[in-house]
Image (cartoon, coloured by chain):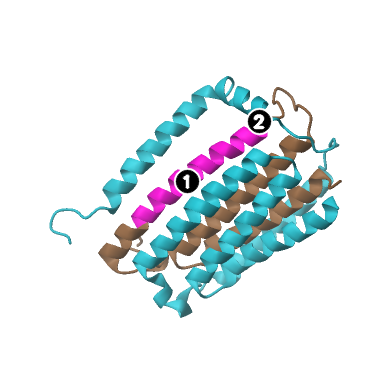
Chain colours: A brown, B cyan
Amino acid sequence: MVDLVWFQLLSAALFVIGLYGVLARRSAVLILMSIELMLNAVNINLIAAAAHMEGFGSFSRFDGQLIAIFIITVAAAEVGLALAIVLRMYRNRSTVNVDEIDLMKW
Amino acid sequence: MAWVLFIALAVVTLGGGLAVVATRNVVHAALALLVSLVAVAGVYLLVYAEFLALVQVLIYGGAIVIVLVFAIMLTRSAEYPRTSDNRQWPLAAVAALGLLAVLVPAFLINAVQDTEAKNAAFTGIAQSLFTTWAVPFEIASLVLLVALIGAIIIARSGPGEN
């Protein structure tokens, strides 16, 4: 039996990898992929905690999984919208590198 | 047995994640992301969340990665392979390692007294979704609709464009 803490450590490691990707990458598409990694890290944490803990306060065993389903829903909406913005950005500026989109930076 | 599976899945998940943030080729990054996300579905199976594993493979593997590949194709960002990291990447590495150094002790110190992982039945999930979580469920459908319409409006060509 794998203890809950190992799932939490896996999720922490995946989240940190995603954070590095968000901060270090230039391409907006790669930043989006890193955000997906971070969202998945949170989902691992939620689902593992839901499976390992029998009723926590007013939360039932299913609530962790349901919040994860909502996160996946929002992630799908986010990817659709963000990629539409990336396409528009590429059409207007011919680049997807976030450090070249500096019109509002002074 | 569970340990062997967990270690194998964790290695594939983290390896895929590292490949996403380290590779120079954007298409390879998308494929590494797919590997990592499918391994995460395996992790869900380890904690008996079969429904979530199914959703993960369908939505992430089947939809999100495909959409990402389409975006790479349409923006041709794979043509500039040498410029994938910005100049502040050492700072980013420091920030990420700093967060890891905070998170790991936090999880280890506050390790909860957990019970054996147990299955949550499909019927229970459905019942909870349509009773306790009914309002967020409806809002989620509205969010998806708004995102759909917004994506179409943002991405389509305006007048005077081709």
Label 2 Cα crowd, 10 Å radius (few <14 / some 14-19 / many 20+): few
Q: Position of residue B106 (x, y in %)?
A: 77, 48
Outermost residue toward the bottom in this view? B82
Could you tell whether B66 is left or right of B61 in the image? left
- Magenta stretch prevailing secondary structure: helix
**Type of the residue with mark 2:** Phe
Could you tell whether A45 is left or right of B61 in the image? right
- Is disc 1 placed on a helix, strand or loop? helix
Which mark is on residue A76? 1
**With respect to residue A91, does B41 lie above or below?**
above
Q: Position of residue B53 (x, y in %)?
A: 64, 45
Q: Is residue B67 magenta?
A: no
User: Quick one: B60 or A16, which is closer to the camera?
Assistant: B60
Could you tell whether B67 is left or right of B31 in the image? left
| Magenta highlight range | A63-85
Q: Which quarter of the image is occupied by the C terminus of chain B?
A: bottom left
Query: Residue at coordinates 54% horizontally, 47% vertically from top-left?
Result: B58
Disc tally is: 2
**With respect to residue A20, does A50 lie above or below?**
above
Q: Kindly indicate the quadrant of the structure image that contains residue A102.
A: bottom left
Label 1 Cα crowd, 10 Å radius (few <14 / some 14-19 / many 20+): many
Q: Position of residue B52 (x, y in %)?
A: 63, 41
Q: Which residue is mark 2?
A: B122
Q: Is residue A74 magenta?
A: yes
Measure the alpha-carbon separation of dots 2 and 1. Answer: 22 Å
**Type of the residue with mark 1:** Ala
Chain hosting mark 2: B
- Is disc 2 placed on a helix, strand or loop? helix
